[in-house]
Structures are given as structure tokens and as C-alpha cells.
Image (cartoon, rainbow, N blue to C red):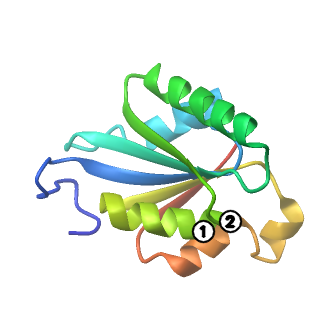
Amino acid sequence: MRGNDTKDDQNGWFDVAVLVEREVTGTAARRMVELYQMKSAPLRYNLVRSRLATPETEADQLMQKSLERLESLGVEVTGTVTDQEPIEALADLVGVTSSEEAVVVTDRHRVAEMFRRDLASQARTRLDLPLFHLVNR
């Protein structure tokens, strides 16, 4: 039931899959929560981050910071750090959680964005659901 505020799965959540390039800053967390504040169904953010580009402990620490920032805003959130490529990890997360929408949180990459090689452009090509791109500030 794509694009609908109400979810008829067994637990009633409106799931959002979130690919995190590095971490979710406070500003990005607030903007993400604002995007979905009008949803009538209970909302859950499911974060995934690849550890391929960073040391394992750093990836885990950055995920923990991201989870804490979102939890401090009073939202339900889960998080996973994986050894998969980022787009593969997001696609798998969408499948596992039956997410209705996706968000990609990245740092600014002007050249990659210009040539549509950034993570958000790749995710839009791969996924068949609404996707938002938030840039950390």
C-alpha cells in the first residue's frame, strides 16, 4: 500500500527506510521528523549505514549518535550497520521493513550530485517509492 498514511501490516507502523552516509546531524534529524509529522499512522525510522568506508568502531559510534539524536526528538527508531554497499543495504532494508518511503542523509557532494552519481540519485534509480534527500549541515 505505497504512499498511504495508514499501514495494514501486522503491527501498524508506517516505516521509513533511512540510508545514512555518515551520521544524522541534529539539523537533519529535525528536518526528517518535520517531513513526517503529519502522518496519522505510528511512524518508525529504520536507519542503515555501511561500514565499508570507515573503521568498524567509528561506523558503530556514528550510528549510535544518529539513533540518539532521533530518539531525543521522541521518535521510534532502529539502526543497523552493515558490510553491504550502501544502495544494496537500503534496498534490503526497504524489503525487510516494507518501508513506505525512503530518506537518504548525506554530506554535500556537488560534483557527484551534478552527474547524478550521488547516493540519493542511485537510490531513486533503484527503488520504486518516494525518496527524500537530506544534506547534513
Residue 46 versus residue 84 in the image, above or below: above
Return the x and y of residue 65 as percentages of the image width and height: 61, 27
Q: Residue at x 68, y 65 (%)?
A: 119
Secondary structure beneath disc 2? helix
Q: Which residue is mark 1?
A: 87
Q: Which mark is residue 136?
A: none
Return the x and y of residue 15 as percentages of the image width and height: 32, 51
Q: Nearer the viewer, mark 1 or mark 2?
A: 1
Q: Quadrant of the N terminus?
A: bottom left
Q: Which residue is mark 2?
A: 119
Q: Quadrant of the C terminus?
A: top right
The amino acid sitting under disc 2 is: Leu
* Crowd rating for badge 1 (residues with CA inside 10 Å; few <14, some 14–19, many 20+): many
Is residue 9 found left or right of 123 in the rendered image? left
Is residue 129 found left or right of 134 in the rendered image? left
Callout 1–callout 2 Cβ contact below 8 Å: yes
Is residue 85 found left or right of 16 in the rendered image? right
In space, the residues marked 1 and 2 are separated at their CA atoms by: 7 Å
Task: Determine which quarter of the picture holds residue 55.
Answer: top right
Residue 63 versus residue 117 in the image, above or below: above
Q: Residue at x 19, y 44 (%)?
A: 41
Task: Determine which quarter of the picture holds residue 98.
Answer: bottom left
The amino acid sitting under disc 1 is: Ile
Task: Determine which quarter of the picture holds residue 121.
Answer: bottom right
Secondary structure beneath disc 1? helix
